[in-house]
């Protein structure tokens, strides 16, 4: 707790300095990332890189062991017709599915990420959230995707949110912690920036835009704002924080735009799945179809790709 | 003061919208007298790609509509076209028809749409069957639409050729991507405007103008196109379509017809674009009974 207190004190100082976000400026900068001309060879590399950064996700009430097994198989065999493809970075599931997922991806290098803290609403008592997290970690989760208490954040109880993140971080042990801000509920980019700073100082290894249950999700404006928070923190402390846009990124084009943005804001060091992830379910197939289009020269049909 | 005439820009029709071609290119076909017909989009392979995606997206909803509802919507196309008849006649005359031929062509197009509107809730009963089998199964075959159909409209016809090929396809629940006649494109775009105001869901009919030579390869190799219909007379173009179709075993149908003839229509234009699905449904074998279902 002492450690938390120190961090918090530091944050409160930083929080006073949490800069305002120039929305117009953000929009103009983001628009420019989308005009880069990407040549064929670079595009191919970018697409394969994007595949390797995907957290293949299924977070539905109707998830079953069968569905999770099928997704785990897909994570390791994206499109066997085409040799030499990478696997995805991780599979992302509910805590109750961690055990089965862990078994299915064993030895493949694919991580298992579990959402926790009463995902997606986060409306549960702190003890429940900690138990939820410990359960997922004990089942073998390599990464924990927690949600912040947006209600508390929006009513100004920043200390509560900060403490909560710090305690979940403790509960994670060796698992890496991704903190979901659910930017669709934060309303303004100023709030997004404030929440990003808060999460980073509270101990997040990754900050993540959204649960995927709320629209809008990972818009480029929001992702850019969060990248800037990571950049400022890195410039101050030399500590790298990861970024995971999630929700709404379903096309290769958008994925490539995101990669361009990461490269230009944070630099090449972040262009690996250790520091950048896409939370997505349907992105993988679109990227695969683009790669097949480049390989064969003909437009593809989803009939010939696995179900996601 | 004399009114300055501005040549109309004819846009393409994709997913219920009228975008310009993504390539930004256009061409200006002329009639025999040397008069420019309009500014026509010279569509690119990316427009073909967008049109196929739109058609695929629309397929589920369109094929699951009730046959009766599809019939009503097709009938509505005929009504809307009727309301625009003078525009079609003017365009046909501009493209080189005589007034009489133009009027006949528009009349025939309306009649043909009504004809296929009528087939919507009837072809299934004629094409499907209950089959006699020697085991205790109820065995029946029903027709299902093929999916996305690429239509290469005949080169020598502006309206009736296109209508004759598109209507049977959508009558049977398919969605279509149409490459309009390159040098007679006006009625195709005006037809798109008619379709757009006829309760036809966006994406069911997509119409592109431009060079067939450029677009045929993209359309015929596209893995998400399930069948091709060719209405032209160019055997080299047909051969190319057939060879490319092998890639995902598209069905290819080539009809060379004089579409202006009143009888250039029929059930087989609908049933050609249907796949037959046969179901073996186990039934209790009632001892001694001969016909047990």
Image (spheres, coloured by chain):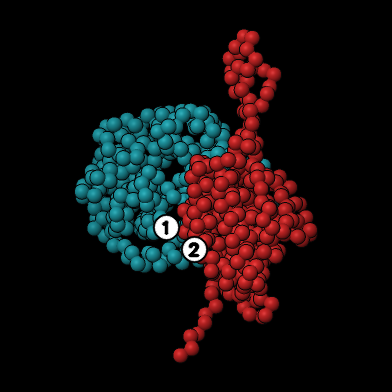
Chain colours: A cyan, B red
Question: On the same chain: label 2 and label 1?
Answer: no
Q: Is residue A75 above or below residue A193?
A: above
* Residue B230 % position (x, y): 70, 55
Instruction: Say which residue appears at 55% left-offset and 78% top-offset.
Output: B7
State the mark number for residue B10: none
Q: On what subunit does the disc labeled 2 rest?
A: B
Residue B285 seen: yes
Residue labelled with disc 2: B83
Q: Quadrant of the C terminus of chain B?
A: top right
Disc 1 is placed on an element classified as: helix
Toward the top, the furthest residue is B287
Where, by quadrant of the figure, is residue B35 drawn?
bottom right
**Residue B172 rendering spot, x and y as whole percentages:** 59, 45
In this picture, is A286 found above or below B126?
A: below
Reading the image, the residue beneath label 1 is: A220
Residue plotted at (59% across, 49% down): B116
> Which quarter of the figure has residue B103?
bottom right
Say which chain tag 1 marks. A
Identify the residue shown where x is 52% and y is 61%. B82
Which one is nearer the viewer's eye here, B18 or A137? B18
């Amino acid at each position: 707790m002492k450690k938390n207190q120190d961090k918090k004190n530091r944050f409160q100082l930083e929080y006073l300095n949490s800069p305002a976000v120039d929305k117009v400026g953000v929009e103009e900068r983001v628009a420019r990332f989308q005009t880069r001309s990407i040549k064929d060879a670079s595009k191919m590399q970018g697409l394969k890189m994007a595949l390797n950064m995907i957290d293949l996700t299924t977070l539905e009430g109707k998830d079953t062991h069968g569905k999770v097994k099928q997704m785990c198989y897909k994570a390791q065999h994206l499109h066997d017709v085409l040799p030499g493809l990478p696997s995805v970075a991780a599979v992302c599931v509910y805590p109750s599915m961690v055990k089965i997922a862990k078994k299915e991806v064993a030895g493949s290098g694919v991580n298992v990420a579990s959402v926790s803290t009463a995902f997606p609403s986060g409306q549960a008592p702190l003890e429940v959230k900690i138990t939820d997290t410990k359960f997922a970690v004990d089942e073998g989760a390599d990464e924990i995707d927690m949600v912040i208490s947006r209600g508390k954040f929006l009513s100004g109880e920043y200390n509560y949110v900060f403490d909560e993140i710090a305690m979940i971080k403790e509960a994670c042990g060796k698992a890496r912690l991704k903190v979901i801000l659910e930017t669709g509920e934060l309303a303004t980019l100023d709030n997004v920036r404030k929440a990003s700073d808060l999460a980073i100082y509270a101990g997040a290894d990754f900050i993540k835009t959204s649960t995927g249950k709320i629209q809008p999700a990972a818009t480029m404006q929001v992702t850019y704002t969060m990248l800037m928070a990571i950049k400022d923190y890195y410039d101050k402390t030399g500590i790298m924080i990861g970024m995971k846009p999630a929700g709404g990124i379903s096309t290769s084009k958008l994925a490539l735009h995101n990669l361009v943005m990461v490269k230009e804001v944070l630099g090449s060091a972040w262009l690996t799945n250790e520091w950048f992830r896409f939370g997505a379910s349907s992105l993988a197939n679109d990227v695969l179809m683009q790669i097949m289009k480049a390989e064969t020269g003909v437009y593809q049909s989803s009939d010939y790709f696995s179900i996601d | 003061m004399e009114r300055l005439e501005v040549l109309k820009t004819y846009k393409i029709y994709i997913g219920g919208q009228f975008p310009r071609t993504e390539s930004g290119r256009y061409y200006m076909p002329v009639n025999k007298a040397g008069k420019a017909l309009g500014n026509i989009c010279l569509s690119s392979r990316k427009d073909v790609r967008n049109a196929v995606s739109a058609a695929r997206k629309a397929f589920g909803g369109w094929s699951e509509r009730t046959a009766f509802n599809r019939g009503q919507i097709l009938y509505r196309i005929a009504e809307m076209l009727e309301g625009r008849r003078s525009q079609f006649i003017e365009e046909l005359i501009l493209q080189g028809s005589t007034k009489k031929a133009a009027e006949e062509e528009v009349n025939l197009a309306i009649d043909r749409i009504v004809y296929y509107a009528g087939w919507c809730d009837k072809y299934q009963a004629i094409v499907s069957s209950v089959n006699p089998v020697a085991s205790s199964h109820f065995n029946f075959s029903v027709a299902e639409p093929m999916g996305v159909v690429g239509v290469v409209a005949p080169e020598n016809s502006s309206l009736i050729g296109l209508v004759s090929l598109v209507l049977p396809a959508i009558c049977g629940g398919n969605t279509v991507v149409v490459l309009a006649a390159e040098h007679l494109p006006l009625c195709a775009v005006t037809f798109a405007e008619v379709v757009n105001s006829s309760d036809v869901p966006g994406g069911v009919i997509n119409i592109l103008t431009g060079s067939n030579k450029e677009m045929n390869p993209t359309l015929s190799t596209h893995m998400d196109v399930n069948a091709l219909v060719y209405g032209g007379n160019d055997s080299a173009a047909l051969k190319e379509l057939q060879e490319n179709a092998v890639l995902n075993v598209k069905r290819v149908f080539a009809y060379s017809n004089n579409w202006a003839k009143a009888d250039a229509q029929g059930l087989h234009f609908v049933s050609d674009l249907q796949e037959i699905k046969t179901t073996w449904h186990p039934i209790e074998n009632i001892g001694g009974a001969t016909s047990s279902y």
